[in-house]
Amino acid sequence: MFDIFAYSFIRNAFIAGTCVAIVAAVVGYFLIVRGLTFAGHSLAHIGFAGAAGAVFLGIHPVIGLLIFTIGSGVGIGFLARTLRERDIAIGVVTTFTLALGFLFLSLYRGYAEKAYSILFGTIVGISSLDSTVTLIFSILALAVLCFLFRPLLFSSVDPEVAQARGMPVRLLSVLFLVIVAITISISVQIVGVLLIFTLLVGPAATAIRIARTPLGAIALSIVLGIIYIWVGIYLAAITPLNFYPLNTVSLPISFCVATISFGVYLPVRLLSPLWLNRRRRELTAQPQPLAMQPEQAKMEPEVLRSSR
Amino acid sequence: MFELFHLYQDQDFVFWAFAAGTVVAIVSAIVGYFAVLRSQTFAAHALSHIGFAGSTGAALFGISSFAGMFLFTILAALGMGALGNRLRGRDIEIGMFLSFVLGLGVLFLNLYTQQATSTVNLLFGSLWTVRAADVRVMLLCGLGVLVILACIFRPLLFASIDPQVARVRGVPVRLLSLLFMVLLAITIAEAVQVIGVLLSFALLVVPAASAEHLVHRPLAAIGLAILLGLGFTWGGILLALVGHWPVSFYICALATGAFFLTYYLQTRRIPRRYKPLPHPSCECYDPAESQV
């Protein structure tokens, strides 16, 4: 069972995959709370052009991804209010960037294999340099997220009140999209551009329906994300060795992660009304406290402090 | 320009590429107009993803990939039509389902063939590989779609613009919406052959959306959308023959350029076009007020 760890690329894939799963789970939680799940999807599509351009120019794909996704992330952050409800404009830009990526790749020799691995991810080509880069960027992203945690949560849950309290809501949303861009850039090498939704949004969407508190949801979604990616890499790695009918092919890693993610999400989504309704009833049945509870009174100044 | 035709006149594939491109451009411009009008552009996107799984799955089981794509997109369209408004605002659920379906398509393709080239062709289109038999099927389906659309044109337009009033007037809104979803599914199955799963937006939505920027009467908008769609496709094929870059890239680049150009023209034009006439009964007409 553990003989697959003899290959160095599998070890690298596990290291990189774990980092990616942790960061993606935390970022995915905020994406859902802020209602930006499709911004994540579009950023990944735009990143395809960056990755393909980098391959064409002979530099590391992550560099191209970072440039394109951070650029468009900042753009979306600044235009967010005007961009909402503009499905068609976003669709046109995404289609064009996909076509641009296709052009870059078709100019590159052996383009089909490279395009395939950027679109659907791979565990084969991950070097120790890649896993180190992934590790550094995920620590960076997590550090920034920890630092911004409370103000970001506040401004995600209730942007108007946060703004009234004097928080830099605009700046926070731009910073957050930069973190999303970094997360997508490091996730693409494993799950690919097209299926990033499953790793970014899948664990958090499941966790948010089970856990009661934000921290609980984030912790649960990290656990789920790590399980998805570990099982996914394991399945992708052992199929060419073990299963008889499939012994000439390897399962694509992105398919494994997508199927596990969907398979966990679907029953939770279908069953969650049972306990969510009960919880809502409990909440409404409680008499509303007239005075502020002691814990809440303690929380209040903390929110204020972290906002400064 | 004309030596190009002499250069390629013995090449069958150029003729079939033009034929397929023309059929797809016309049909998808007309169907796309209604998709834009009914704000179902996202449904179009979803259907093309589902068609990818259908096409690769059919190839795995030895059926024609066109047939598989038809089957999957029509079934999905019926499902989406049945769910109707309950699908609105469910980004996460739809996204998860689409990702799963796309992953399934990749799996089928991986089991069927180890060649990455066929995946890339399906995703980004391969107009040069279209054959006479494909064009015949496309032409038949396209004609069928257009005939049905012509029969339901007026009620569909009514139901798209104001569904509530249409229902009160006795128009079968629900049935029309199901029927339209099926037509959309067939159109997408066709468009994917030309421009690929990921780029079908460029032929389906962009011509109609750009035409909507410039003209507002339905027939004029549909006519302009057809012209734009044909312009993108023919221009893309001609440019690809000259420049040797992929056809899909040229088509998408032309479409994007046209979309933002027409958007710019629209923002320039609106103040002139919509200057309302002073109300006859109002003496104290204020011109500043009409500049909204």
Image (cartoon, coloured by chain):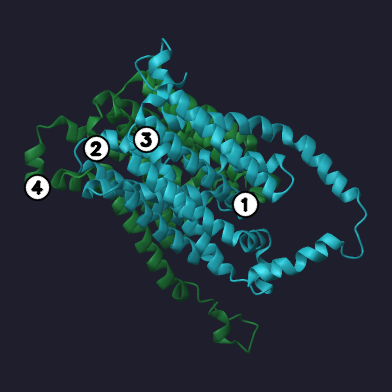
The quarter of the picture where residue B59 lies is top left
The residue carrying mark 3 is B192
Judging from the image, what is the letter of the chain drawn in green?
Answer: B
B5 versus A172 height, above or below: above
- Marks 3 and 2 share the same chain: no
Residue B80 showing in the rendered view: yes
Are the residues under marks 4 and 3 on the same chain?
Answer: yes
The residues tagged by marks 2 and 1 sit, at their Cα atoms, a distance apart of 48 Å
The colour of chain A is cyan
Q: Please provide percent x and percent y for residue B127.
A: 26, 35
Q: Which residue is mark 1?
A: B162
Is residue B292 rendered to the left or right of residue A215? left
Q: Which residue is mark 4?
A: B2
| Mark sitting earlier along the chain (3/1) | 1
At 9% from the left edge and 32% from the top edge, which residue is drawn? B10
Q: Secondary structure at mark 4?
A: helix
Quadrant containing the C terminus of chain B in the rendered view: bottom right
